[in-house]
Image (cartoon, helix red, strand yellow):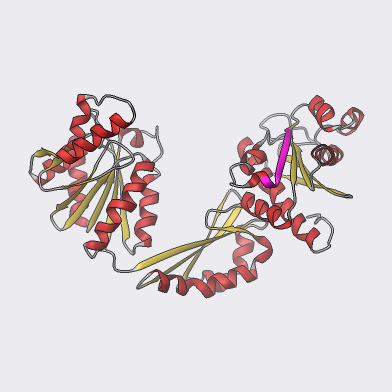
Protein backbone atom coordinates (compact mmCIF):
# COMPACT_ATOMS: atom_id res chain seq x y z
CA UNK A 1 0.00 0.00 0.00
CA UNK A 2 1.57 3.27 -1.14
CA UNK A 3 0.43 6.85 -0.59
CA UNK A 4 1.12 10.38 -1.73
CA UNK A 5 0.35 13.52 0.25
CA UNK A 6 -0.62 16.71 -1.58
CA UNK A 7 -0.44 20.07 0.20
CA UNK A 8 -2.34 22.76 -1.67
CA UNK A 9 -1.97 26.50 -1.24
CA UNK A 10 0.04 29.30 -2.80
CA UNK A 11 0.99 30.43 0.71
CA UNK A 12 2.88 27.14 1.09
CA UNK A 13 4.92 27.21 -2.11
CA UNK A 14 5.75 30.89 -1.55
CA UNK A 15 7.18 30.12 1.89
CA UNK A 16 4.72 32.37 3.73
CA UNK A 17 3.28 29.43 5.67
CA UNK A 18 4.89 26.19 6.82
CA UNK A 19 3.34 22.88 5.78
CA UNK A 20 3.01 20.78 8.94
CA UNK A 21 0.12 18.68 7.63
CA UNK A 22 2.28 16.43 5.44
CA UNK A 23 4.52 15.43 8.32
CA UNK A 24 1.57 14.64 10.59
CA UNK A 25 -0.29 12.65 7.92
CA UNK A 26 2.82 10.66 7.01
CA UNK A 27 3.34 9.67 10.62
CA UNK A 28 -0.26 8.59 11.01
CA UNK A 29 -0.24 6.62 7.76
CA UNK A 30 3.01 4.98 8.80
CA UNK A 31 1.41 3.82 12.03
CA UNK A 32 -1.25 2.15 9.88
CA UNK A 33 1.32 0.31 7.79
CA UNK A 34 0.86 2.54 4.75
CA UNK A 35 4.07 3.78 3.14
CA UNK A 36 4.15 7.39 1.99
CA UNK A 37 6.27 7.60 -1.16
CA UNK A 38 5.78 11.22 -2.19
CA UNK A 39 5.05 14.68 -0.81
CA UNK A 40 3.88 17.25 -3.34
CA UNK A 41 3.28 20.93 -2.58
CA UNK A 42 1.49 23.08 -5.16
CA UNK A 43 -0.18 26.44 -5.50
CA UNK A 44 -3.74 27.51 -6.26
CA UNK A 45 -3.77 26.85 -9.99
CA UNK A 46 -6.53 24.69 -11.48
CA UNK A 47 -4.52 23.08 -14.29
CA UNK A 48 -1.61 22.31 -11.96
CA UNK A 49 -4.02 20.82 -9.41
CA UNK A 50 -5.57 18.55 -12.03
CA UNK A 51 -2.11 17.40 -13.14
CA UNK A 52 -0.91 16.80 -9.59
CA UNK A 53 -3.97 14.73 -8.65
CA UNK A 54 -3.65 12.73 -11.86
CA UNK A 55 0.04 11.95 -11.36
CA UNK A 56 -0.53 10.98 -7.72
CA UNK A 57 -3.51 8.75 -8.55
CA UNK A 58 -1.55 6.91 -11.23
CA UNK A 59 1.49 6.13 -9.08
CA UNK A 60 -0.02 5.51 -5.64
CA UNK A 61 -2.90 3.55 -4.14
CA UNK A 62 -3.93 6.35 -1.80
CA UNK A 63 -3.82 10.12 -2.26
CA UNK A 64 -4.49 12.46 0.67
CA UNK A 65 -4.74 16.17 -0.07
CA UNK A 66 -5.11 19.08 2.33
CA UNK A 67 -6.24 22.59 1.44
CA UNK A 68 -8.32 24.18 -1.27
CA UNK A 69 -11.73 23.39 0.29
CA UNK A 70 -12.58 26.88 1.52
CA UNK A 71 -15.20 29.25 0.12
CA UNK A 72 -12.92 31.66 -1.77
CA UNK A 73 -12.15 31.81 -5.48
CA UNK A 74 -8.68 30.32 -5.05
CA UNK A 75 -10.08 27.15 -3.39
CA UNK A 76 -10.02 24.81 -6.38
CA UNK A 77 -9.80 21.27 -5.03
CA UNK A 78 -13.41 20.36 -5.84
CA UNK A 79 -13.10 21.67 -9.40
CA UNK A 80 -9.77 19.90 -9.92
CA UNK A 81 -11.14 16.50 -8.83
CA UNK A 82 -14.28 16.93 -10.93
CA UNK A 83 -12.18 17.82 -13.98
CA UNK A 84 -9.90 14.85 -13.40
CA UNK A 85 -12.86 12.48 -13.12
CA UNK A 86 -14.67 14.06 -16.06
CA UNK A 87 -17.77 14.70 -13.94
CA UNK A 88 -19.75 17.70 -12.75
CA UNK A 89 -20.21 19.17 -9.29
CA UNK A 90 -23.34 18.23 -7.34
CA UNK A 91 -24.71 19.95 -4.24
CA UNK A 92 -25.08 17.72 -1.18
CA UNK A 93 -28.09 18.82 0.94
CA UNK A 94 -26.77 17.25 4.17
CA UNK A 95 -23.45 19.06 3.85
CA UNK A 96 -25.17 22.36 3.08
CA UNK A 97 -27.35 21.98 6.16
CA UNK A 98 -24.31 21.20 8.34
CA UNK A 99 -22.48 24.29 7.05
CA UNK A 100 -25.51 26.48 7.66
CA UNK A 101 -25.97 25.06 11.17
CA UNK A 102 -22.30 25.77 11.93
CA UNK A 103 -22.83 29.48 11.20
CA UNK A 104 -26.10 29.57 13.13
CA UNK A 105 -24.51 27.99 16.20
CA UNK A 106 -21.93 30.79 16.20
CA UNK A 107 -24.53 33.51 15.83
CA UNK A 108 -23.50 34.27 12.25
CA UNK A 109 -25.23 34.41 8.88
CA UNK A 110 -23.84 32.12 6.18
CA UNK A 111 -22.55 33.99 3.13
CA UNK A 112 -23.67 32.81 -0.30
CA UNK A 113 -20.06 31.98 -1.09
CA UNK A 114 -20.06 29.23 1.56
CA UNK A 115 -22.75 27.38 -0.36
CA UNK A 116 -20.01 26.28 -2.75
CA UNK A 117 -18.45 24.21 0.02
CA UNK A 118 -21.40 21.82 -0.30
CA UNK A 119 -20.50 21.00 -3.92
CA UNK A 120 -18.85 17.64 -4.62
CA UNK A 121 -17.68 15.78 -7.73
CA UNK A 122 -20.47 13.46 -8.88
CA UNK A 123 -19.90 9.97 -7.49
CA UNK A 124 -17.74 11.11 -4.58
CA UNK A 125 -18.61 10.81 -0.89
CA UNK A 126 -18.75 13.88 1.39
CA UNK A 127 -16.75 13.65 4.63
CA UNK A 128 -18.42 15.49 7.53
CA UNK A 129 -16.38 18.14 9.32
CA UNK A 130 -17.64 18.76 12.85
CA UNK A 131 -14.88 21.29 13.56
CA UNK A 132 -15.31 23.66 10.61
CA UNK A 133 -17.29 24.60 7.53
CA UNK A 134 -15.29 22.65 4.92
CA UNK A 135 -16.46 19.05 4.35
CA UNK A 136 -13.91 16.64 2.95
CA UNK A 137 -14.11 14.41 -0.11
CA UNK A 138 -13.64 10.65 -0.59
CA UNK A 139 -13.43 9.61 -4.23
CA UNK A 140 -12.19 6.74 -6.40
CA UNK A 141 -9.92 7.85 -9.24
CA UNK A 142 -8.82 4.92 -11.36
CA UNK A 143 -7.08 2.38 -9.12
CA UNK A 144 -6.51 4.98 -6.43
CA UNK A 145 -8.54 6.31 -3.54
CA UNK A 146 -8.37 10.10 -3.21
CA UNK A 147 -9.39 11.87 -0.03
CA UNK A 148 -9.35 15.63 0.45
CA UNK A 149 -9.25 17.33 3.85
CA UNK A 150 -9.22 20.97 5.01
CA UNK A 151 -5.86 22.70 5.31
CA UNK A 152 -6.54 23.91 8.87
CA UNK A 153 -4.46 21.46 10.96
CA UNK A 154 -6.95 21.16 13.84
CA UNK A 155 -9.80 20.31 11.46
CA UNK A 156 -7.64 18.02 9.32
CA UNK A 157 -6.49 15.92 12.29
CA UNK A 158 -10.01 15.38 13.61
CA UNK A 159 -11.31 14.40 10.19
CA UNK A 160 -8.39 12.08 9.50
CA UNK A 161 -9.04 10.09 12.66
CA UNK A 162 -12.84 10.19 12.52
CA UNK A 163 -13.50 9.94 8.79
CA UNK A 164 -10.44 8.64 6.93
CA UNK A 165 -9.07 5.91 9.18
CA UNK A 166 -12.40 4.03 9.53
CA UNK A 167 -12.85 4.09 5.74
CA UNK A 168 -9.30 2.85 5.14
CA UNK A 169 -9.93 -0.04 7.50
CA UNK A 170 -13.33 -0.82 5.99
CA UNK A 171 -11.76 -0.88 2.52
CA UNK A 172 -9.13 -3.36 3.71
CA UNK A 173 -6.31 -0.91 3.04
CA UNK A 174 -4.84 -1.21 6.55
CA UNK A 175 -3.10 -4.56 6.73
CA UNK A 176 -0.35 -4.12 9.32
CA UNK A 177 0.38 -1.94 12.31
CA UNK A 178 3.55 0.10 12.62
CA UNK A 179 4.54 1.82 15.86
CA UNK A 180 7.21 4.41 16.58
CA UNK A 181 8.56 5.15 20.03
CA UNK A 182 10.99 7.89 20.98
CA UNK A 183 13.29 8.07 24.02
CA UNK A 184 14.81 11.51 24.62
CA UNK A 185 18.13 12.30 26.30
CA UNK A 186 20.14 15.35 27.26
CA UNK A 187 23.67 15.85 28.51
CA UNK A 188 25.84 14.22 25.83
CA UNK A 189 26.35 14.73 22.11
CA UNK A 190 24.79 12.63 19.37
CA UNK A 191 28.05 10.89 18.42
CA UNK A 192 28.95 10.10 22.04
CA UNK A 193 25.56 8.54 22.64
CA UNK A 194 25.58 6.52 19.43
CA UNK A 195 29.06 5.22 20.26
CA UNK A 196 27.42 3.43 23.19
CA UNK A 197 24.63 2.03 21.02
CA UNK A 198 26.27 0.85 17.81
CA UNK A 199 24.81 -2.62 18.35
CA UNK A 200 21.32 -1.10 18.28
CA UNK A 201 21.69 1.44 15.46
CA UNK A 202 23.51 -0.90 13.08
CA UNK A 203 21.82 -1.19 9.69
CA UNK A 204 19.49 -4.19 9.55
CA UNK A 205 18.80 -4.28 13.29
CA UNK A 206 15.31 -5.50 14.11
CA UNK A 207 13.55 -3.43 15.28
CA UNK A 208 14.94 -0.44 13.39
CA UNK A 209 16.65 2.11 15.67
CA UNK A 210 17.57 5.62 14.56
CA UNK A 211 19.16 8.51 16.41
CA UNK A 212 18.40 12.19 15.84
CA UNK A 213 19.26 15.53 17.46
CA UNK A 214 17.07 18.59 17.96
CA UNK A 215 18.30 21.61 19.94
CA UNK A 216 20.75 19.43 21.90
CA UNK A 217 18.11 16.85 22.81
CA UNK A 218 19.19 13.46 21.45
CA UNK A 219 16.48 10.93 20.63
CA UNK A 220 16.42 7.23 19.91
CA UNK A 221 13.58 6.45 17.50
CA UNK A 222 12.52 2.81 17.53
CA UNK A 223 10.23 1.43 14.82
CA UNK A 224 8.34 -1.84 15.09
CA UNK A 225 5.65 -3.56 13.08
CA UNK A 226 3.29 -6.47 13.41
CA UNK A 227 -0.04 -7.89 12.39
CA UNK A 228 -1.68 -5.63 14.99
CA UNK A 229 -0.63 -2.95 17.45
CA UNK A 230 0.00 -5.42 20.28
CA UNK A 231 2.39 -7.43 18.13
CA UNK A 232 4.13 -4.26 16.91
CA UNK A 233 4.62 -3.02 20.47
CA UNK A 234 5.94 -6.39 21.56
CA UNK A 235 8.55 -6.27 18.78
CA UNK A 236 10.21 -3.16 20.27
CA UNK A 237 9.84 -3.91 23.99
CA UNK A 238 13.28 -5.52 24.51
CA UNK A 239 15.11 -2.79 22.60
CA UNK A 240 13.36 -0.05 24.57
CA UNK A 241 14.31 -1.79 27.80
CA UNK A 242 17.97 -1.91 26.72
CA UNK A 243 18.00 1.80 25.92
CA UNK A 244 16.34 2.73 29.21
CA UNK A 245 18.83 0.67 31.21
CA UNK A 246 21.92 1.76 29.29
CA UNK A 247 21.15 5.49 29.25
CA UNK A 248 19.10 5.94 32.43
CA UNK A 249 20.94 9.04 33.78
CA UNK A 250 20.52 10.89 30.47
CA UNK A 251 16.86 10.13 29.80
CA UNK A 252 14.58 13.15 30.25
CA UNK A 253 11.40 11.67 28.82
CA UNK A 254 9.73 9.69 26.07
CA UNK A 255 7.51 10.54 23.13
CA UNK A 256 7.10 14.31 22.97
CA UNK A 257 8.65 14.87 26.41
CA UNK A 258 11.78 17.00 26.67
CA UNK A 259 14.03 18.37 29.39
CA UNK A 260 11.31 20.55 30.91
CA UNK A 261 9.04 17.51 31.35
CA UNK A 262 11.87 15.60 33.01
CA UNK A 263 12.40 18.44 35.49
CA UNK A 264 8.70 18.77 36.34
CA UNK A 265 8.46 15.01 36.77
CA UNK A 266 11.33 15.05 39.28
CA UNK A 267 9.89 18.02 41.16
CA UNK A 268 6.56 16.26 41.54
CA UNK A 269 8.19 12.97 42.49
CA UNK A 270 10.22 14.63 45.24
CA UNK A 271 7.45 16.97 46.37
CA UNK A 272 9.84 19.86 45.75
CA UNK A 273 9.26 23.46 44.66
CA UNK A 274 11.25 25.60 42.22
CA UNK A 275 11.93 29.32 41.80
CA UNK A 276 13.77 31.13 39.01
CA UNK A 277 15.98 34.18 38.50
CA UNK A 278 16.49 34.73 34.77
CA UNK A 279 18.57 37.37 33.07
CA UNK A 280 19.76 36.50 29.56
CA UNK A 281 16.98 33.93 29.01
CA UNK A 282 14.36 36.60 29.69
CA UNK A 283 11.74 34.28 31.19
CA UNK A 284 12.19 31.46 28.66
CA UNK A 285 12.56 28.82 31.38
CA UNK A 286 9.42 30.03 33.14
CA UNK A 287 7.54 30.04 29.85
CA UNK A 288 8.49 26.45 29.11
CA UNK A 289 7.65 25.32 32.63
CA UNK A 290 4.17 26.83 32.53
CA UNK A 291 3.38 24.94 29.32
CA UNK A 292 3.46 21.68 31.34
CA UNK A 293 0.05 20.78 32.81
CA UNK A 294 0.01 20.56 36.60
CA UNK A 295 3.23 22.50 37.09
CA UNK A 296 1.53 24.91 39.51
CA UNK A 297 2.04 22.46 42.35
CA UNK A 298 5.83 22.72 42.07
CA UNK A 299 6.73 26.00 40.29
CA UNK A 300 6.38 28.98 42.61
CA UNK A 301 7.45 31.75 40.25
CA UNK A 302 10.40 33.67 38.91
CA UNK A 303 12.07 37.02 38.44
CA UNK A 304 13.26 38.31 35.07
CA UNK A 305 16.14 40.35 36.50
CA UNK A 306 17.47 41.67 33.21
CA UNK A 307 18.97 44.88 34.57
CA UNK A 308 21.51 45.24 37.34
CA UNK A 309 18.98 47.26 39.34
CA UNK A 310 16.47 44.40 39.12
CA UNK A 311 19.11 41.97 40.35
CA UNK A 312 19.76 44.22 43.34
CA UNK A 313 16.21 45.34 44.16
CA UNK A 314 14.35 42.10 43.49
CA UNK A 315 16.90 39.44 44.38
CA UNK A 316 19.12 41.20 46.89
CA UNK A 317 22.30 40.84 44.86
CA UNK A 318 24.78 43.34 46.41
CA UNK A 319 25.52 46.23 44.06
CA UNK A 320 29.23 46.11 44.92
CA UNK A 321 29.29 42.42 43.94
CA UNK A 322 28.05 43.32 40.45
CA UNK A 323 30.51 46.22 40.29
CA UNK A 324 33.49 44.01 41.23
CA UNK A 325 32.71 40.94 39.13
CA UNK A 326 30.22 42.10 36.50
CA UNK A 327 26.65 40.92 35.98
CA UNK A 328 27.90 37.95 33.99
CA UNK A 329 29.96 36.15 36.60
CA UNK A 330 30.01 33.14 38.88
CA UNK A 331 29.51 35.32 41.93
CA UNK A 332 26.41 37.08 40.62
CA UNK A 333 24.86 33.85 39.33
CA UNK A 334 25.22 32.30 42.78
CA UNK A 335 23.78 35.37 44.51
CA UNK A 336 20.82 35.42 42.11
CA UNK A 337 20.00 31.78 42.83
CA UNK A 338 20.28 32.24 46.59
CA UNK A 339 18.14 35.37 46.38
CA UNK A 340 15.39 33.56 44.48
CA UNK A 341 15.52 30.63 46.90
CA UNK A 342 15.05 32.92 49.90
CA UNK A 343 12.42 35.23 48.44
CA UNK A 344 10.17 32.48 47.14
CA UNK A 345 10.81 30.02 49.96
CA UNK A 346 11.48 27.29 47.40
CA UNK A 347 13.31 24.00 47.79
CA UNK A 348 15.42 24.70 44.71
CA UNK A 349 16.26 27.81 42.72
CA UNK A 350 17.89 28.32 39.34
CA UNK A 351 19.53 31.45 38.01
CA UNK A 352 20.89 32.36 34.59
CA UNK A 353 23.12 35.25 33.55
CA UNK A 354 25.12 35.52 30.37
CA UNK A 355 25.81 37.15 27.01
CA UNK A 356 23.40 35.89 24.35
CA UNK A 357 24.69 38.25 21.65
CA UNK A 358 25.08 39.06 18.93
CA UNK A 359 26.77 42.07 20.56
CA UNK A 360 28.01 42.80 24.06
CA UNK A 361 30.90 40.37 24.15
CA UNK A 362 34.52 41.13 25.06
CA UNK A 363 37.72 39.05 24.85
CA UNK A 364 37.36 38.28 28.56
CA UNK A 365 33.61 37.64 28.38
CA UNK A 366 32.67 36.62 24.83
CA UNK A 367 29.24 36.07 23.34
CA UNK A 368 28.03 32.66 24.45
CA UNK A 369 29.44 32.90 27.99
CA UNK A 370 26.78 31.73 30.44
CA UNK A 371 26.71 31.20 34.19
CA UNK A 372 23.97 29.05 35.73
CA UNK A 373 23.42 29.17 39.47
CA UNK A 374 21.65 26.53 41.52
CA UNK A 375 20.72 26.80 45.18
CA UNK A 376 19.16 24.33 47.60
CA UNK A 377 18.92 24.39 51.37
CA UNK A 378 22.46 24.85 52.71
CA UNK A 379 24.10 24.37 49.32
CA UNK A 380 24.75 26.34 46.14
CA UNK A 381 26.81 25.85 43.00
CA UNK A 382 27.54 27.52 39.66
CA UNK A 383 28.18 26.10 36.20
CA UNK A 384 30.02 27.95 33.44
CA UNK A 385 29.04 27.35 29.82
CA UNK A 386 30.74 28.72 26.73
CA UNK A 387 28.72 28.22 23.59
CA UNK A 388 30.08 28.63 20.06
CA UNK A 389 30.12 32.21 18.78
CA UNK A 390 28.36 30.93 15.66
CA UNK A 391 25.22 30.22 17.68
CA UNK A 392 22.37 32.66 17.18
CA UNK A 393 20.87 34.54 20.11
CA UNK A 394 17.76 32.38 20.24
CA UNK A 395 19.81 29.18 20.07
CA UNK A 396 22.04 30.31 22.93
CA UNK A 397 18.97 31.11 24.99
CA UNK A 398 17.25 27.82 24.14
CA UNK A 399 20.27 25.69 24.96
CA UNK A 400 20.95 27.64 28.15
CA UNK A 401 17.41 26.97 29.31
CA UNK A 402 17.80 23.25 28.65
CA UNK A 403 21.16 23.06 30.43
CA UNK A 404 19.73 24.86 33.45
CA UNK A 405 16.64 22.68 33.70
CA UNK A 406 18.59 19.48 33.21
CA UNK A 407 21.03 20.45 35.96
CA UNK A 408 18.10 21.06 38.30
CA UNK A 409 16.67 17.66 37.35
CA UNK A 410 19.96 15.93 38.15
CA UNK A 411 20.35 17.89 41.39
CA UNK A 412 17.00 16.58 42.60
CA UNK A 413 18.03 13.01 41.79
CA UNK A 414 21.36 13.41 43.60
CA UNK A 415 19.86 15.13 46.62
CA UNK A 416 17.30 12.32 46.96
CA UNK A 417 20.20 9.85 47.01
CA UNK A 418 21.95 11.85 49.73
CA UNK A 419 24.62 13.19 47.41
CA UNK A 420 25.68 16.83 46.81
CA UNK A 421 24.67 18.96 43.81
CA UNK A 422 26.47 17.62 40.72
CA UNK A 423 29.07 20.11 39.55
CA UNK A 424 29.11 19.05 35.89
Is 28 situated above or below 113? below
Relative to 319, 263 lies left or right:
left
Closer-to-camera residue (360/141)? 141
Where is residue 242? Give x, y as percent.
Answer: 59, 73
Would residue 65 be found to the left or right of residue 329 on screen?
Answer: left
Residue 93: which quarter of the image?
A: top left
> How far across and down, in percent of the image, does residue 313 sit?
83, 26
As for residue 298 lying within the magenta part, the answer is yes
Q: Is residue 27 left or right of residue 244?
A: left
Quadrant for the C terminus, please.
bottom right
Residue 74 counted in the magenta span? no
Q: Nearer the viewer, residue 271 or 282?
A: 271
Front-lying residue, 193 or 321: 321
Tell me which corner region of the image, top left, top right, bottom left or bottom right, holds residue 423.
bottom right
Magenta stretch in the rendered image: 297-303
At 40% from the left and 44% from the top, the residue drawn is 20
Residue 206 seen in this snapshot: no
The one nearer the camera, 143 or 230, is 230
Would residue 85 appear left or right of 127 to someone viewing this image? left
Q: Quadrant of the N terminus?
A: bottom left
Q: Position of residue 101 (x, y in %)?
A: 26, 34
Amino acid sequence: MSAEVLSIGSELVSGQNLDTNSQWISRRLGSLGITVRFHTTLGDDLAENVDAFGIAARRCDLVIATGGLGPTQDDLTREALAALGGVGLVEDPASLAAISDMFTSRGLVMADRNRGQALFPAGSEPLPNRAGTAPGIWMAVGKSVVTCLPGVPAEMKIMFDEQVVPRLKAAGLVCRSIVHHKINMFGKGESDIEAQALDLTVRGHVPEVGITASKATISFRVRGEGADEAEALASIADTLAQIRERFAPLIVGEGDEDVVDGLVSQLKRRGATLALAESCTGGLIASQLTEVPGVSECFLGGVVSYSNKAKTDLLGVPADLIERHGAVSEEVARAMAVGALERFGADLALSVTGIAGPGGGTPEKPVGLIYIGLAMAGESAVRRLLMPSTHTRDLIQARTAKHAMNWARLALVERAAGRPIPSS
